[in-house]
Image (cartoon, rainbow, N blue to C red):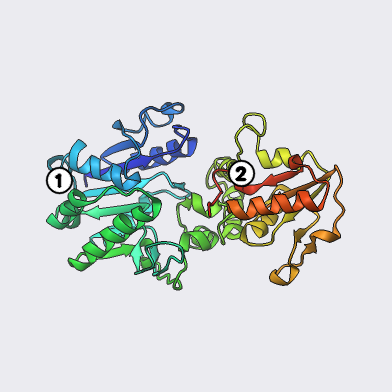
Amino acid sequence: MKRLCIYVTYNKENEIKEYMGYMLKALRGYTTTLYVVCNYLKISDGSERIVPYADDIFYRENKGLDAGAYKDMLCNIIGWDAVYQYDELILMNDSFLGPFYDFGRYFTSMKDIACDFWGWTRNFGGEYAESFIGKYESHIQSYYLLFRSRAFKSSQFRNFWEDLLYPETYDEAIFYFEHGINNLLKREGFIPMAVTDVWGMVFEYNENPYRLYSLELIRDKGFPILKKKSIQITNAGFDNAIKAVEYIEMNNLYPANLIWDLVDSQFYIENYAPAGVNCLAFFYGKFKKIYIYGAGVCGKNLKVYFEHKHWQHKGFIVTNKSAQDTECIHFDDIQIDDETGIIISVIRQKVSEEIVNYIKTKSNCKREQLFVVYDCKAIRLSD
C-alpha cells in the first residue's frame, strides 16, 4: 500500500511546535511519502522536529489556508502524474495533537470498510448562526481526510482542486473545501465514512463531536487525537476536554505537557509578562482577591481552568444578575482595593471596552488590576 501524506502547518510565530514532530514521527511508519507544507516562507524555530520524518518541506505564503496548500501541492508542486502513483492520499493539518494510541489500529480497522474516503469524525449537520454558510449537511470533518484511489484518481476530484478558489477566511475554507469536497464526492457516488460511523456514534444536530465529547471519544472509544479547538477557553466543551487531558496524563498516553502548554499559551498578551510566562498566571500572582467578570461560556470555563490550576477566586461578578444562570455577585456589592484583580471574560472588543470603562467609572480600580481576555489574541472575537 503506497500512501502519500500532505501535512500542512501554520502559526504566526513560524515555529514547528514539539507536538507536530510527535505526530509526524507516529505517521512516518504508515506513509510511503510524507510532505510537510509550511504556510510561511521560513521556519524560525523547531525545524529539527520534522526534518527526520519529512521526505521534503515546502514553503509558501498562507494563501488559501490549508485548502490552498493542498491545491498548490496537488496541482502544481507534486503534480497529478506523481500523485497517481499512490494507492491512498492523506490530507491533514496541524490542528490536532496525538496520537494517544498507535495509528496502525485505525488503518487496519478501516482497511475493510467499504468507502472511498474517510476521516476521524462526522458532523451530522447544523447551522452557523453568524456566518454566510448558514445551514450545512452531514459531512466528514476535514482536518484529516484519507482518499482511496477510486476517489482521488477520479476526474471529479482533480477538477475540484483545479477549480477551487483560494479561501480568504476560515468560514470560506469550511464552505468551499470541507463542505465542497464532501458534497461533490457524495453527489458523484463516492462513499464517505468516519471512524465514529464505524463505532456507531451518532451526534445531534449542531453538535461538533470533537468539541463536545473529547473525553468519551478518547477514554471510551480509543480515539487517537485531540483537536486544539477543544481546549480553547471559548469552547462549550472545554470542561470535557480538560477531563480528557487529565485522563491522557493519568494513563501516560502522551506527553501531556505538550497539551497543557497549548492550554496556557492561549492567554498570551504581547509585552504583558516575562517571556515564557503564562500571562494569566502572572496576573493571578499579583493579587490576593480575584473575581471573574461575566458568567458566560468563557467565564464558566475560566472557573474550570482555575480548578485545574488549584487557584482560588471570589466568584463571578455581573451588573445584571437576572440574566445569569450561575450564582453571581453584583458589581456594586464587592469591595475593590489594591489587592483586587478582575478578569473580564468577555471576548468581544466593544463589550469588553464598555466593561472596562464601567468598572473604572464605578470604582477606584486601576487598569492594571484588570485582565481582559479579549486582549489575548488567540481568544479574542471582534464585533
Whether residue 312 is visible, yes or no, is no
| Residue topped by disc 1 | 84
Residue 251: % across, % down = 58, 50
Residue 5, quarter of the rendered image:
top left
Q: Looking at the image, which residue is at 46% across and 66% down?
A: 129
Residue 88: % across, % down = 23, 50
Q: Looking at the image, which residue is at 75% across and 68% down?
A: 321
Residue 17: % across, % down = 48, 35
Residue 203, quarter of the rendered image:
bottom left
* Circle 1: element type: loop
Depth check: give the residue in front, 135 or 57. Answer: 135
- Please give left or right for residue 237 compared with residue 24 in the image: right
Whether residue 323 is visible, yes or no, is yes
**Label 1 to label 2: alpha-carbon separation:** 47 Å
- Please give left or right for residue 81 compared with residue 358 in the image: left
Quick check: 344 above or below 267?
Answer: below
Q: Label 2 sits on what residue type?
A: Asp
Mark 2 neighbour density, 10 Å: few (under 14) some (14–19) many (20 or more) = some
Depth check: give the residue in front, 376 or 178. Answer: 376
| Residue topped by disc 2 | 375
Q: Looking at the image, which residue is at 75% across and 63% down?
A: 319
Quick check: 213 above or below 288?
Answer: below
Q: Looking at the image, which residue is at 62% across and 57% down?
A: 298
Number of labels in the image equals 2
Residue 116: % across, % down = 23, 60
- Please give left or right for residue 58 compared with residue 233 in the image: left
Determine whether label 1 and label 2 are within 8 Å by CB.
Answer: no
Q: Label 1 sits on what residue type?
A: Tyr
Mark 1 neighbour density, 10 Å: few (under 14) some (14–19) many (20 or more) = some
